[in-house]
Amino acid sequence: MKGSVDYSALAARIKVWAKELGFQAAGISALDLAADETHLQAWLAANQHGEMAYMARHGHKRSRPEQLLPGTLRVISVRMNYFPPGISSADKILSDSCAAFVSRYALGRDYHKLMRNRLKRLSLQINEATESTTHRVFVDSAPVLEKALARNAGLGWIGKHTNLLSRDAGSWFFLGEIYTDLPLPADQPLTSHCGSCTACIDICPTQAILSPFELDARRCISYLTIELHGPIPEPLRPLIGNRIYGCDDCQLVCPWNRYATPTPEADFLPRHHLDGAHLCTLFAWTEEEFLNKTEGSPIRRIGYQRWLRNIAVALGNATSEPEIIQSLQSRADHPSELVREHVAWALRQITLETAPESPILRRLSRIREATHE
């Protein structure tokens, strides 16, 4: 059946079907990731992946799709916007040391299931059109170089912060893939449009972006609050501020995000007032409350102890108010050594002078002024 298929027409239809399923864009790439493989191996050799051992597993399957799924000829990449409309502004939350900042992607329901189900529907449509069943759907579920594949599929370019960027969507989007044995015409990669801009490098609170396209995950707040299982290194704790799950600073200052379109997906809207809840309110959650309120949320993956660990650090960086001190003291004898150690640090830290205004707030103010000129 494959021989009688008009693959150019099919590629165009796949992109239409993808948009009908709620993806904002789709593209098709070939499999050459040799340069990206070299970059990945150098990154791993420098141990900049920290505790993310899964990045080093599976040999070359991450950079050689045909090894992950034998017979693969092309990869279909899709993009889905996630920035929720009408939420509290990030700079307002970051300027309030008693408010909890949660990365914008994690405010609502977990995207994995939603995107996977829609990709499966897209795969079924392709099957019906070609009678081919050699497809596999991925949404962060296997060793896949999703940003490099999406770049090669024409969905954007990799910015200096290592996130994918698009002229019409900024970087507030999720990616997913379908590996297929269909010889579809490949799209052309996009060239970089970052120019001389270094806003993302300059703003990083922990200086995790060592140079353009070089990220030391061990210093990244997203890594420290999500991927790291043990204690957060003390020198980095004051730099985390009130960020309790992830960090969006490099995206918040990126000029291309002026053109980002809010998501139409109701599942990505904030739950339980996580777009600016008080730190003490979240720190008071019992484990049962945490499990109930994070059901279906990406936040649940860090577990209750790391949730308290992260908030304890943020409380240590907050203003020294009776409510903050009482909140920390309530967990001073928590059964978890991890929690107790971070609470003890926070109680010591809270007696220090309040930190100066975050540089991201100054930068965001300048960006807003430039936008409205």
Image: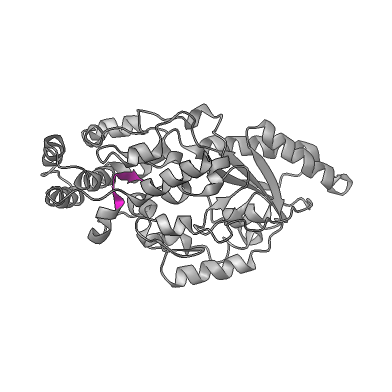
**Residue 331 in view, yes or no:** yes
* Magenta highlight range: 240-246
x, y (%) of residue 301?
Answer: 37, 43
Magenta stretch encompasses residue 161:
no
Residue 46 or residue 2, whichever sits in front: 46
Residue occupying the point 46% across, 37% down:
110
Q: Is residue 11 above or below residue 65?
A: above
Q: In which quarter of the image is residue 17?
A: top right
Q: Is residue 266 left or right of residue 135?
A: left
Magenta stretch encompasses residue 244:
yes
Q: In this view, does 168 lie to the left or right of 238?
A: right
Question: From the image, which quarter does the N terminus lie in?
Answer: top right
x, y (%) of residue 228?
Answer: 33, 55
Q: Is residue 137 left or right of residue 323?
A: right
Q: Is residue 269 above or below residue 210?
A: above
Residue occupying the point 45% across, 59% down:
201
Q: Quadrant of residue 19?
A: top right
The number of callouts visible is 0
Residue 232 or residue 129, whichever sits in front: 232
